[in-house]
Amino acid sequence: MATATVANHDAAAHDHHDHEHHDNFVTKYIFSIDHKMIAKQYLVTGIFWAVIGGFLSILFRLQLGFPDMDLEFLRPLLGGWIDESGKLDPTFYLALVTMHGTIMVFFVLTAGLSGTFSNFLIPLQIGARDMASGFMNMLSYWLFFISGVIMFISLFIKTGPAAGGWVVYPPLSALEQAIPGSGLGMTLWLIAMTFFIASSLMGGINYITTVINLRTKGMSFSRLPLTIWAFFLTAVIGLLSFPVLFAAALLLVFDRSFGTSFYLADIYIGGEALPNTGGSPVLYQHLFWFLGHPEVYIVLLPALGITSEVIATNSRKPIFGYKAMIISMLGITILSFIVWAHHMFVSGMNPFLGSIFMFLTLIIAIPSAVKVFNYLTTLWRGNLVFTPAMLFSIGLVSFFISGGLTGIFLGNSAIDIQLHDTYFVVAHFHLVMGSASFFGMLAGIYHWFPKMFGRMMDARLGYVHFWISFVGVYMVFFPMHYIGIAGFPRRYYSWTNFAFTDMYTDLNMFVSAAAIITFAAQFIFVFNFFYSMFKGRKASANPWRSTTLEWTTPINPGHGNWPGEIPTVYRWPYDYSKPGAEEDFIPQTVPLSATPESNLPHEQEQVKLELEIMKEEADLLEANESKA
Amino acid sequence: MYGFLIAVGVLLLLSIIWMVYRIQTLVSVVKGSDKKIATGSNKVNAILFIVFLVAIGALMFWYSIKEFHNYHLPIGSEHGVVTDRLFWITMAVTGVVFLITHVLLFIFPYKYQYKEGRKASFYPDNNKLEVIWTAVPGVVLAGLVISGWMAWSDITAPAPEKAHVIEIMGYQFAWDVRYAGKDNVLGDHDYRLITASNGHGIDFTDKNSLDDFPAPKIVIPKGEPVLFKIRARDVLHSVFAPHMRLKMDAVPGMPTRFWFVPTKTTEEMRAELDDPEFEYEIACTEICGRGHFSMKKVIEVVEPAAYQKWLTEQKSFIQMNPALAKGGEVESKELAEIK
């Protein structure tokens, strides 16, 4: 049946629905309003930023792992930030840490991940011609691009980029006297983030509108692939939380430039007492983390959605507990807004508030646990095909478990006293949101590459990439738990000033070496990506034998996605290995009435209804045609 | 020359890898194995998951046990014993979950790797199972939360009346310490009063400030409650005394506090660790600028008797610099009393 549907569309491809030939280079590749091209723009920009962000981390890992190393060879790149003795400047070290965080969280894992896959998959998987507003979608990318340009420029200015940590807590980020990065660098950071927020709001509004309004016939919410559920909820989270970050940033701009005192009070710096009184730095932290925590799920949910899809497809099994997965994602969405203050247990806020947030935080562990168990059960008694995407998805589940469990320590305010702002936290979030989301993104790229470019990525290079990255990530971040338990604080240029941290030079060296290898291995992927784009093996229409709608489009879909009618959806997206069915997958476009041999009892009852509707529609079509 | 040779070598190596890769690809096309759903590499990947599980798992456990005494800091405070116990209970619970889930996660790929002709079992849901694995984590987490909450409430409860009051003020890039003196009450302060000679901005018109004294290191008595009153002068800092399991941000404009009871003197700890150099340290854990990594202060825990003796030896701000009192309305009689 699957082949029949595909054949139909191939035939339809000869129809004159092709919009492509009106496009010139600029409208096709630059100011495109085709969601697929915008997705690719996001993806390539995301890869660019991932390389920059990763490279910055290698620079500070050199300092941490090999503190005595002569970094003179970096002078051509870093100039004055390498001092006369060949050492990295401590202020620039902080700038590196800050920019690494900002770039990775916002540019790579928010824009690169959501921007790519929400744009690419939402119309394709729900059966829409394009996003609700193609123009706004284009604007969203270009605002992101401007944001990136500004952030990139800030890397090269004389006083250095923002250096107050990616959370940019005032007063450090508000006072130029406190750190040079809080001058022009911070101004550029704030401008860049403003553009970024505008970009992600435009994207988010589009995703939400498209999912609600443009689903094809039969594509009810209970038949949406989990990817779409994830992207939809992610967009909702972003829409509700990013404006709060904007407010926080705006107040910071006022404090920095217009003499207000929202966050500043009683400060004596650089030999003078500042006039600001009555502000509260803790207010900023509340506002920041009101975005900052949901942001974790903005980064993670799309990755989990992608994983659900990839694991189900390659296990040749329906995802276990489809409804439970949706409910847990909904739970995570709601709870993500009421846990933010667990980042602030020792910030000086009222300890009673700390107890409340401890309870709420540990509740969010439950839907996360449910998701893990459901993934495991999906693998159980499957027929597992290890495509690179599948490997990365399994890797994601592993990171999600490892990093998620350490969250139970940190969410407990009593235990957090010791662990807060140590390397334990660094290990925790790099595993659970950093590496997990990154693996989700890679899984998505490997899986949907054939749909994006009509060619296959090389699987063996994918395997090599996966195994080096998987082992590498654990070698980088697992040892950080030990140094975190030992109390090593974050964002330290050097650990030799304290007796309690003046050890583990060997472990830090090991971590740095692992980081360099892991980073280098990513170029296998970069090569594979760009090489396969032009020279990869030609893809077939449905290379993973998947059920979802995007694989019913032509191999290289034009603007509008389906040359003929948009297909109608008759079933949920996870009919893999259905008993009685001939193939081990039934695409969503196959009517229940066409598969009496594999229908479950309750589906058999729907067949009658389905046939009636189909008949009505055929009549309507006929009537219309005769009128014309 | 040497660099050139290396470059040539690398280039040669890369081109050989490239050729092998191309040949393999062509062979697979000729054999038609690229059309198969799962090739031999499927099996290799399945086996690698088991190898990963065993090798990395063994490495983690071996290192965790071998290094325990290194990464586990000795505890120097009463509440530290409680929070550490919570930590290790949580470690046990999560450790079990970590182990079980990972064993399953890596054994399933091996066990259920693709076999032609086999069909995966169609198993879309099971409400009973899902209720179980929603409820069980719920109960376990509730247990952890409640014990954590009880510890947290005790730790953050108001300090006992008799607690020794010590002020710690963070600034770029050091900590300054002020003792409350005989009356155990710190005098008022105002950041506008800060001058070169009055770094704390102490208001010497407040009588409570007259006996306040500075100290180069924090000396505290063993077994008696100590209250740190924490503030910052310029940007955020955070007082972190790792052995005391103590951490609290220093916030400009908003005083914070943390109280605790030290349980071992520095001498006792030195003997216990067999390390004559050992000192309790305070570090900064909130990014504060260039010197963030070097904000060190030493805590010395002594026997209560020695502490009392040390107290009497200290000189107040006023005694050290009588000029500070000028301009204030301090009566000379009171000053005389203190002297």
Image (cartoon, rainbow, N blue to C red):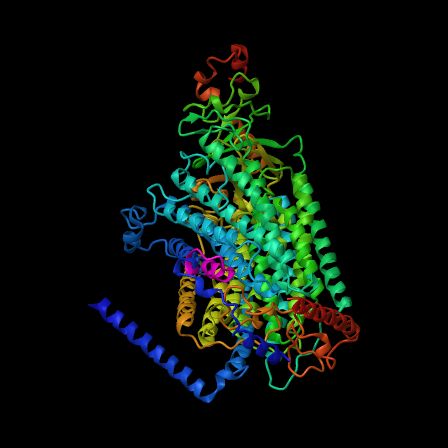
Is residue A55 in the magenta section?
A: no
Q: Decide which of A92, A531 is in the foreground and name it.
A: A531
Furthest residue in direction left, as rendered? B1
Give me the residue at 57% from left, 53% from top. Answer: A206
Residue numbers of the magenta segment? A28-43
Q: Position of residue A402 (x, y in %)?
A: 58, 62
Taking B72 as reference, is B3 above or below it?
below
Residue A489, relative to residue B60: is it above or below? above
From the top left corner, tell me how far across and down residue A387 is, in percent.
Answer: 53, 75
In this view of the protein, which residue sits in the foreground, A263 or A584?
A584
User: Percent position (x, y) of residue A579?
Assistant: 71, 80
Give the main secondary structure of the magenta stretch: helix
Image position, residue B149 (x, y; %): 69, 46
In the image, is residue B158 above or below residue A437?
Answer: above
The residue closer to the viewer here, B115 or B136, is B115
Residue A70 seen anywhere in this rendered image of the structure: yes
Farthest residue, direction front: A627
The quadrant the C terminus of chain A occupies is bottom right
Tally of numbered discs: 0
Q: Name the image quarter holding residue B8.
A: bottom left
Q: Quadrant of the N terminus of chain A?
A: bottom right
Q: Is residue A32 magenta?
A: yes
